[in-house]
Structures are given as structure tokens and as C-alpha cells.
Amino acid sequence: MKIKYLYQLLGSHISILIIALLVLSLSFTHYVENLVYENKVDELTSFGEKILSDFEREPFLRGKLLLTQYSNLLQARNTELIVFDHNAIVTYSRKGIIPRITLTEKEWNILLSGNVVQLKYDPGRFDQAVTLVALPYLVNDQLIGGILLLSPISGTREMISQINQYLLYTVLISLSIAFLLSLFLSKLHVKRIEKMRDATSVISTGNYDVFIKGSSFDEIGELASDFNQMVRRLKSSQEEIEHLENRRRQFMADVSHELRTPLTTISGVIEGIRNDMIPDDQRDKGFQLIDKEAKRLIRLVNENLDYEKIRSNQVILHKVENKLIDIFEIIKEQLSILAEEKGNSIRIEVDSATEVLADYDRLIQILMNITKNSIQFTSNGTIWLRGKIEQSYTVVEIEDTGSGIDPKEIDSIWRRFYKADLSRTSNPYGEFGLGLSIVKQLVQMHKGTIEVVSEKGKGTKFIIKLPSKET
């Protein structure tokens, strides 16, 4: 059976209030009743002690005039005075209603010991419910007799009933106010939850343009804030997925184009050689072309394999101290021909003593990728390879005077499949936008950082910081 959350809240609130008020009412009634009876007993005891103190001046059982005066006085307070002797025979009673008093053995023993018998409530010993006090009169520690004060509890009962009636009215008014307040607060909380439910339904349709007002006032407000944060992350993830999907499509298109071109070239040259369509003096050139295109395909495969190995943590680094100038010389030597083809020069600026703690092969891969990228986007310019020590880091800078990168695109160049210039579909190095993505992950594996400073049309600088000590 489905019960609305609003009714659950109301039911829980009202149930708790009813139980609390019931316990409070019963406790209060019991307390008031005890208090009233105790006050009555104390009052009767005080009267009795006063009467006994006067008996010291008047022989006990003989001061009839004194007893009559006290009896009349007590009658105005709805209290009956009875005097009895040591045999429990009544010697004085204004109404003469009983010949002797009836006390239990326990009560009589209390009197014999010189103590006062007090009963807050006696239901029917004297044909009515009364409050009873019996005081002994002792002479030389011998019980001569005593006095008995009786006060009907009907008046006390009426007062307690009146108090209970007022208490009932108070409870009903409190419950009414509490019900209205609980209804208001419950609707408020349920409304906030319904907003989140509606927002969840919207999100389930794929629409992430949802916002719920949050706060730190209570858990629901914090839940709303967490919900908004979740929506932002989902939206960001969705945008990233869409972005990657677009890049994947572009990647597939680039792959198809890049694979088709070298494979077509290789197939055509082999077909020409097999059918003697290529002259003997041109065959060496054809074999060189096959070799070049085959290496191009190998680079593509290796680049993809490297990326997957790095992403799945299959690459193990072997860090050693390397002379940075030696590594720069290797980069310059291997890329000098490529640089000269575009009219570029590579310059090295590093102290011969500068060392870097890194995996040799992976550091070569990092610097080779970045330098190739600089050569690709620089024409008739200069590429600087710099190195220096700053505090506990070795800083490597690769700067060019090329076309630069739009500042809006800098954060995007590390993404897989990203290419700064999509119009360039025949890039022989880092063909499919994986190079810089691999570079960043390799730098992070070295526990280093890499950043880019660039301005469109004014060149680009890559800054790599690698810890000079193992951490």
C-alpha cells in the first residue's frame, strides 16, 4: 500500500506530539494530585499538632470546650475532628458518627511508637473517601489517646478534575496548532523533494539544463547542492562524450584517409614493379617510397599502442640522471633535416652540467614530440631547446616562432584526437593528434608538470618541470 510522504510526515509528527503530551499530562496530573494531597496532609498534621500542644494546658479528654472550638473551626474547613482513647474508643466527635475508630495493626503500632499516621487517600473506611491524619497523645511514653482529623477529598477531586479539564483544553489547542504547523512544514519539505524528483525526470530524458536552489540550512538543501553538482558533472561528461565522439568521427575519417594514401601508394608501386611498369632506373626510388610509407604506417600504429599502454599503466619508468645537453643534441641531430626542409633552425641553450632525472627513452619521446610539433607549425623560424635548474626542479623549455595557438584552444591540445589545424591532413609526425596527449601523460608519470604559453601568430613555448629528486 502506497502512503504519501506528506501523510507519513504528518503521522509521525502528530504521533510523537500525542505521545509526548500524553506522558506530560499524566505526569503533570500525578504530580498535581500528589502535591494537593501532600499539602492537605501537611495542613491536617499542622492542625493536629496545634490541638495537642493546647492539651498540655488542659487535661486530655476533659477540654470539651476547647475541642468544640477547634471542631467548629475545622468544620469551616470541611474537616472532622475525632478524639479517641488508648482503646480506640471515640471520646469526642461533633457528629458522633462512630463509636470507635478503625485502625490497622500497622497504623496502631505507628501511634504506639509516638509517630503520626498519614493517609493521603482512604477510599471507604468512613463511608467516604477521605484524607486522614492520626496523631498520638503520649504521657511518659505511654499512649493515652489521640486525635483523628478527616477531610473528604471530594473538594480536592473537584479541583484536580478542573485542572485536568484545563489541561485537556491546552492539549487540544496545542495539537491543533502543532497539526497546522506540521502540515505547513511537511508540505514545504515535500515540495522541495518533488522539485528534485521533477528535476530527476528531466535529467532522465537527457536534458541537463536543470538547477535546484540549494542551501546549507539543512540536509535537503545540501542534497540540492550535491544534486546541482552532479548535474554539472553529468553535463560536463555528456559534453566531453559528444566532443570525443566528434573527434572519434574525425579520427576515423583521418585514419581512413591517412591509411588509404600510403597503402594506395605502396600497392601502386608494388603493382608497377610486378608488371614491369616502372623502369629499372626508377625502381630504387619506388622502393624508397614504399619504405617511407611503411614507416609512416608503423609510426601511426606505435603512437596508438603507446597511448593505450600509458592509459592502462603498462609503462614502467626507469629513471636515471641524464645530461640534458646530450639529449638536446640527439633531438637536434635527428630533426635537423626536417627543420631545414621548412627553413627552421634548432638552437640549444643549456649549461653542460644541467642534469634531469627521467626515463631516457620516454624523455626523448616527450621532447621529440614537442619539437616535431614546433617544426610542423613554424616556417623560416627558430626552435629553442632550453634547460635550467630551479629549486628542486629541472625546467625544460621548447620555444618556437611559429604560428602559435589560440589561447582558447590551449586546454584542448592535450585531448586525444585533437589537431590544432584540422585542415592539415598530411602531417607526417603525430598524424592523428595523439602526440601531445601522450606527452602530457608521460610528464605526469614522471610526477612533473607541463604548461603552454602561446599567442596566435607569435609562437609557442612549452614549459616542462620535472622533480630533480625521486619522490
Image (tube, grey):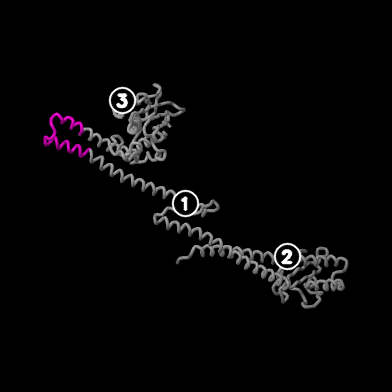
| Label 3: how many Cα within 10 Å (few below 14, some 14–19, many 20+) | few
Q: Per the image, is 349 magenta?
A: no
Secondary structure type for disc 1:
helix
What residue does disc 1 label? 228
Q: Is residue 263 left or right of residue 63?
A: left
Tag 3: residue type? Glu
Circle nearer the N terminus (2, 1): 2
Residue 412 point in image, percent of width and height: 38, 40
Circle nearer the N terminus (1, 3): 1
Considering the whole magenta stretch, tell me its main secondary structure: helix
Q: Residue furthest left?
A: 276
Identify which residue, 157 or 326, lies in the foreground. 326
The Cα–Cα distance between marks 1 and 3, rounded to whole angstroms, is: 54 Å
Q: Is residue 270 left or right of residue 312?
A: left
The Cα–Cα distance between marks 2 and 3, rounded to whole angstroms, is: 110 Å
Secondary structure type for disc 3:
helix
Q: Quadrant of residue 352?
A: top left
The answer to whether residue 186 is above or below residue 97 is above
Q: Quadrant of residue 470?
A: top left
Secondary structure type for disc 2:
helix
Residue 55 point in image, percent of width and height: 85, 67
Q: Which mark is residue 38?
A: 2
| Stretch in magenta | 262-289
Tag 1: residue type? Asn
Tag 2: residue type? Glu
Question: Closer to the observer: label 2 or label 1?
Answer: 1
